[in-house]
Image (spheres, rainbow, N blue to C red):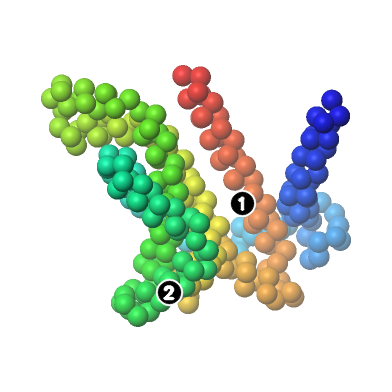
Amino acid sequence: MIKRIFSCVFLALVMLFIYTPILVLVVYSFTDSTVIGVWEGFSFQLYSDLFHDKAIMKIVGDTILLAAGAGIISTILGTTAAIGIFHSKKRAATVMNTVNNIPIINAEIVTALSLALLFAFVLTFINKRIISLLIGHVVITTPFVILSVMPKLKQMDPNVYEAALDLGASPTKALFTVVLPEILPGMLSGFMLSVTLSLDDYIVTAFTKPETFNTISTYVYNAVKVPANSALPGLRALSTLIFVLIIIIVILMNVVKKKEVRK
């Protein structure tokens, strides 16, 4: 009993430590005070200013388009790679899985610097362009798609694919009508994870983006560097909206997973 109480208290303290800064940010997004800690009455002024700021809205739109593009490409590449690894021989699959884990374990600054050097000295025609930024995000997100799809491939009954071939389906048709529907939850999880990672990324973005292009992460970083920046209060509202959106996505994904388990 004492051990259980201690575990609950410890968990509550950890959760409080993690979420208190976010909750403070959320609370002070509903007042138009320029300083956190000074309450000037309940107000939606920061949200109104945020949605009327065309520059920030453009940055948000560009960030979402970049994340969606990176998510789609990485989902296609990651799913294809996962299927290839799954059907490879054991030794080759082990090697490819190890190679896939390197970008995940590797420090992101190393990946970012490597991409920047590659684009600067080898692929100069795409250096510091939107395409270089997109490639950078695909590089860091594709391994997570592979990790999301592989468990679904292992759970799938291999006889189903063989049965489709025996019934006259071509390998391509069997892939799209049998395999992909079976691993679709893993693909969706990988896509959502890719989008989240892309939205959140700063290091790779800073090393590969064009000078005139900003994402939410780079905009926030540049704004925070100037303490007297008038855009700082509005960032409280933007951060709150992002946090609420992520919570909604997580809840929806958990609901879908529970339905799958029941089925």
Which residue corresponds to the image point at 65% horizontal and 55% vertical from the top-left?
A: 239
Q: Give the quadrant of the N terminus.
A: top right
Residue type for callout 2: Ala
Q: Position of residue 218 (x, y in %)?
A: 57, 68
Asked whether the beta carbons under mark 2 and mark 1 sit within 8 Å of each other, the answer is no
How crowded pointer 1 is (Cα within 10 Å; few <14, some 14-19, many 20+) is rated as: few
Between 183 and 101, the residue placed more toward the observer is 101
Between 216 and 45, the residue placed more toward the observer is 216
Tell me if residue 152 comes above or below residue 235 in the rendering: above
Question: Is residue 200 visible from the viewing direction of this image?
Answer: yes
Find residue 263 and name its label: none
Q: Which residue is mark 1?
A: 242
Which one is earlier in the sequence, the residue at label 2 or at label 1? 2
Q: Is residue 122 left or right of residue 38?
A: left
How crowded pointer 2 is (Cα within 10 Å; few <14, some 14-19, many 20+) is rated as: many
Which residue corresponds to the image point at 35% horizontal and 80% vertical from the top-left?
A: 121
SS at mark 1?
helix
Which residue corresponds to the image point at 51% horizontal and 54% vertical from the top-left?
A: 197
Tell me if residue 143 comes above or below residue 232 in the rendering: above
Q: Is residue 172 left or right of residue 56?
A: left
Question: Is residue 134 visible from the viewing direction of this image?
Answer: no
Q: Picture quarter containing residue 149? A: top left
Q: Which residue is mark 2?
A: 116
Q: CA distance from mark 2 to mark 1?
A: 28 Å
SS at mark 2?
helix
Q: Is residue 200 left or right of residue 39?
A: left
Q: Position of residue 242 (x, y in %)?
A: 61, 51
Q: Picture quarter containing residue 230? A: bottom right
Residue type for callout 1: Ile
Which residue corresponds to the image point at 44% horizontal and 57% vertical from the top-left?
A: 102
Between 100 and 202, the residue placed more toward the observer is 100
Tell me if residue 18 comes above or below residue 236 in the rendering: above
